[in-house]
Structure formats: C-alpha cells, structure tokens
Image: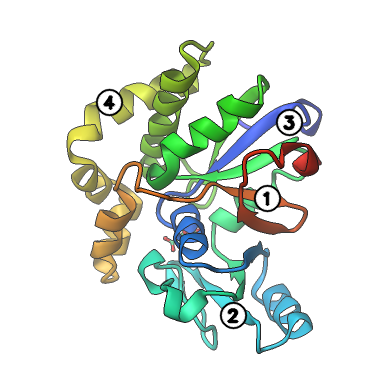
Amino acid sequence: MVQSDAELRHHTVVVVDVLRATSTIIAALAAGAREVIPVDTVENAVKVAQRIGSDRALLCGERNSVRIEGFHLGNSPQEYTPEVVAGKTLILTTTNGTMALARTHAAGRVFCGSFLNAARLAEAIVGTSSETVTILCAGTHGRFSLDDVYAAGAIVSALLGKAGEATLLDGATAALHLFRTAADDMRGALAASAHGRTLIDLGFGSDLEYCARLDVEDAPVPVLDGSQIRPYIPGTDALLQR
Ligand code: MLT
C-alpha cells in the first residue's frame, strides 16, 4: 500500500524492483558507475544525457524488458561491468522501477533494495534511523509482482535481524512469510513468477540467477540524493535528509 506524501515525509522508503531495475542499479554502482540518474521517459533520458555530454553519460534502460533502441545498455545487471560503466553517469529509464522511484519525492530518505544488498541495507537503516520504513514494490504496470514481494520479505527479515524487533504491518508480515517459503530456491521461485517467466522467454534467464543471490559481498546501498543515486556512505545521513 502506498502512503500519502505527508506520511512518507517521515519514512525511510526502500524501492524494490528486483527484476531488474534496483538489482541493476546496485550492480552498476558496484562496478564503479559514478551515479545513476533515474528518469521517467525516453525523451527526458536523451535530454539529460545531452546536457551531461557523451564523454560521461550512458543511456540505459528498457521498455517491456528490452533495451531501448539507440541506448548504450539495457536493464540486465550483467551488462554493467567495470569496463563499461566505471566513472560514468548512467541515465536510466525503465518500465516500472524508475517510475516507482519517481513516486518517492516526498519521502525523508530513499534507498534501492534487492536480495543483493538486503543485510547492508538493514545496517544502513537501523544504524541511523528509528523512522518508519516503507518498502515500495515497483510491481508490473501497477500490478502485484511476486518477485518484488519475495525481495521485500528478505529485506524485512534482514531488518528484523538487525533491529531485534519491529512492528510489522500485514503486508510486511505476508512478504516475510512468502520469502521464507521460497528462500531455499529463490531462483526457482523467481522463475515461477510472471515477470520471471517473461524474462526467461526473452532470453534473460541468467539474470534470475544473478538477482536471486542474497547478500552479495560489498553490494552497495544506493541512496537517492536529489536527482542522483549514489552509494550510501555511513555518516553522511544528515546530508541526505530531503
Ligand atoms: C522495470 O523497471 O519495469 C523492470 O526492471 C523491467 C525489466 O525487467 O527489465
């Protein structure tokens, strides 16, 4: 459930689009991208890239999971290697993930989450804040997406592990239960989800394996800082309050 702007002001929001936008943002920052700028439309992405300049900007993203014509990269996290993205500013537009990020403008703090960074995300949140945490699942065209809910459950589990206790609303409890039932074979669970099946049909099956990995070493915690997403650095919290 999405809270009102007034409620979100006091929340830490974690945006989850595990297949694949938030996993891709984590992969990109891990590979040394300077920052990711999420934008809503293809036209705006091109404008932002032109402003930044072709020596520094890469156009990235998908529509209906397929790379946008003329863009440098699609939305497969495995494309985001240090050779390609290190030092670059990535202008990213995706069907659902970057749209979900755009809905967080009123939130106090916004992180990107996935299986890859669940434990480090929990550390960042619990170490610095006693605020309410809202996990915003991007979904698919406004519909419930099981893959995102599994990842939300992994994040709830990590938050509980770190905080010791927390009051969960029913959506968080349901996500936690679903995660626990699927955790032993998350790749298989993702493959059985509607979006997972679409990605397999499009030839992106190996992305499911990539995105299903829990707590990858040194996975960054992307934080939205103004219009840019950068890796969260502990101790910089005050600067990030929006
Ligand atoms: C999205 O933002 O809609 C997704 O990341 C789609 C995809 O898997 O490429």
Where disc 4 sits, the SS reads helix
Q: Which of marks 4 and 1 is in front?
A: 1
What separation in Å lies between label 4 and label 1 (alpha carbons)?
29 Å
Q: Residue 224 carries which label?
A: 1
The answer to which of marks 4 and 2 sits earlier in the sequence is 2
Percent position of residue 72, x then y: 51, 83
The answer to which of marks 1 and 3 sits earlier in the sequence is 3
What separation in Å lies between label 1 and label 3 (alpha carbons)?
15 Å
In this figure, which residue is indicated by the disc labeled 4? Answer: 180
Q: Which of marks 1 and 3 is in front?
A: 1
What separation in Å lies between label 4 and label 3 (alpha carbons)?
28 Å
In this figure, which residue is indicated by the disc labeled 3? Answer: 8
Q: Where's the N terminus, which quadrant?
A: top right
What separation in Å lies between label 3 and label 2 (alpha carbons)?
31 Å
The answer to which of marks 1 and 2 sits earlier in the sequence is 2
Where disc 1 sits, the SS reads strand
Where disc 3 sits, the SS reads helix
Disc 1 marks a residue whose amino acid type is Leu
Around disc 4, counting alpha carbons within 10 Å, would you say few (fewer than 14), some (14 to 19), or many (20 or more)?
A: some
Percent position of residue 70, x then y: 54, 88
Residue 3 shows in this picture: no
Residue at image position (74%, 76%) is 48
Q: In which quarter of the image is residue 27?
A: bottom left
In this figure, which residue is indicated by the disc labeled 2? Answer: 58
Residue at image position (32%, 42%) is 214
The answer to which of marks 3 and 2 sits earlier in the sequence is 3
Mark 4 CB near ligand 1 (8 Å cut): no
